[in-house]
Image: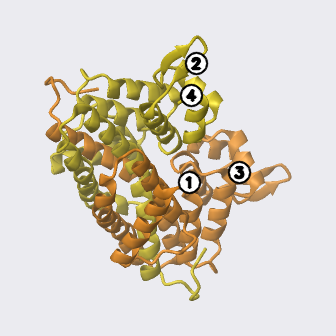
Chain colours: A orange, B yellow
């Protein structure tokens, strides 16, 4: 198909498609004349992946390029590719340097040790988790520390669900793409499920005053 | 304390504090002279809550104002306040109207029925979950449908952990603020825990090629 059809089928504007081609996110099509190239299903698939990473994951274009380069590089192990993707999509958190910060860092550290998780010292998620926990403490919400292990068990269950079926895939490229989609889109899916579960549990724990559905 | 001290203690620039006062997010202090007002610990706490909703939850100022008005209105039940907050922080998803969309909507619907969740027909999380699932299908990642119940169980566990301790609080305002913090900051905390769990499981399922920590 031509670039116009690629744009039409994917719903991505032509100018955006051309931008991705220029930036190297989308591989060039097969040149059929000096001004034309032909694209196929693999381009459509890649375009959908880019849009998902941008629209659902909120990744900047430079990060998408870096992550896709790791997906495409068969010398990069799936663990390293996944690490690159996970590190890239985790917002790095600056935190105030106070007693709440120190306490939260120690609590996350203790949780990791208690649960036997192997997490790099420079993992942004380590700092993000500590920064969020410190904010909770500053807001006087200390109950979250007591809940940390319960949340960790849920996170373990999710990670196991995410990754176990991918480990069964034999092709490295299939694995890499599935792991990427599961990581980035999986976050959004789980956040949405959690919100529905909360709504359902909230109706149980905090009975609404009227019988109408709240809105 | 004066506005300058409020700014200094919270680390929020004076101009931003004044903006929140003008916009009605932060209640006015007690007027001590025509040009001065006095602020106390409750203002500091409210300022920290606003910054958390903006910086961690990514909420627009108009949404923060709306959610805080519901927190402050003792006639609003905790269920309704929480509903308002959860609905406000859930990005509303536009989806292509295709067979993948219809399939995903039906799958989410079936999951809710199967698990006995009570979720409003107009809940944005319903559409978000379906839109993410539809994207996964378009990307050829069908394994997520099979995982939906496993994710739902993890989401239930998280919601139960979130809300059960809050239900034990007796004061309506304490409940409202704890529920809000748990919902907005809890999302970020769980996302970070999930990423650490993935890193740890990834090392197990996809052994790295070298013995060094990946980065």
CA separation, marks 4 and 3? 51 Å
Read off the chain for label 3: A
Q: Which residue position holds label 2?
A: B36
Sequence-wise, the earlier of marks 1 and 3 is 3
Asked if both marks, 1 and 3, belong to the same chain, the answer given is yes
Q: Secondary structure at mark 2?
A: strand
Q: Residue furthest right?
A: A34
Q: Secondary structure at mark 1?
A: loop
Q: Which residue position holds label 1?
A: A95
State whether residue A6 appears in this view.
yes
Instruction: Name the mark nearer the viewer: 2 or 3.
Output: 2
CA separation, marks 2 and 3? 54 Å
- The label number, if any, that marks residue A20 in the structure image: 3
Asked if both marks, 4 and 2, belong to the same chain, the answer given is yes
CA separation, marks 4 and 1? 24 Å
State whether residue A184 appears in this view.
no
Q: Are marks 4 and 2 in contact (CB under 8 Å)?
A: yes
Q: B121 or B170: which is nearer to us?
A: B170
Q: Which residue position holds label 4?
A: B2
x then y, percent, for residue A202: 21, 40
CA separation, marks 1 and 3? 35 Å
Q: Residue furthest front?
A: B32
Q: Quadrant of residue B75?
A: top left
x then y, percent, for residue A92: 58, 57
x then y, percent, for residue A32: 78, 56
Instruction: Name the mark nearer the viewer: 4 or 1.
Output: 4
Asked if both marks, 2 and 1, belong to the same chain, the answer given is no
Residue at the (62%, 78%) spot, across then down: A76
CA separation, marks 4 and 2? 7 Å
């Amino acid at each position: 198909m031509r670039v116009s059809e690629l744009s039409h089928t994917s719903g991505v504007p032509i100018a955006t498609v051309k931008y991705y081609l220029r930036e190297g996110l989308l591989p060039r099509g097969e040149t059929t004349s000096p001004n034309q190239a032909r694209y196929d299903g693999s381009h459509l698939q890649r375009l959908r992946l880019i849009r998902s990473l941008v629209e659902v994951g909120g990744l900047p274009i430079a990060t998408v390029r870096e992550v896709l380069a790791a997906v495409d590089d068969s010398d990069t192990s799936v663990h390293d590719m996944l690490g690159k993707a996970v590190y890239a999509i985790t917002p790095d958190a600056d935190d105030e340097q106070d007693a709440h910060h120190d306490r939260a860092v120690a609590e996350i550290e203790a949780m990791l040790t208690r649960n036997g998780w192997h997490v790099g010292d420079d993992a942004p998620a380590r700092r993000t988790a500590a920064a969020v926990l410190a904010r909770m403490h500053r807001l006087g919400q200390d109950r979250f520390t007591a809940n940390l292990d319960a949340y960790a068990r849920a996170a373990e269950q999710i990670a196991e669900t995410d990754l176990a079926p991918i480990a069964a895939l034999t092709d490295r490229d299939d694995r890499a793409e599935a792991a990427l989609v599961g990581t980035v889109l999986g976050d959004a899916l789980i956040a949405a499920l959690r919100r529905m579960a909360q709504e359902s549990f909230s109706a149980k724990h905090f009975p609404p005053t009227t019988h109408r559905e709240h809105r």
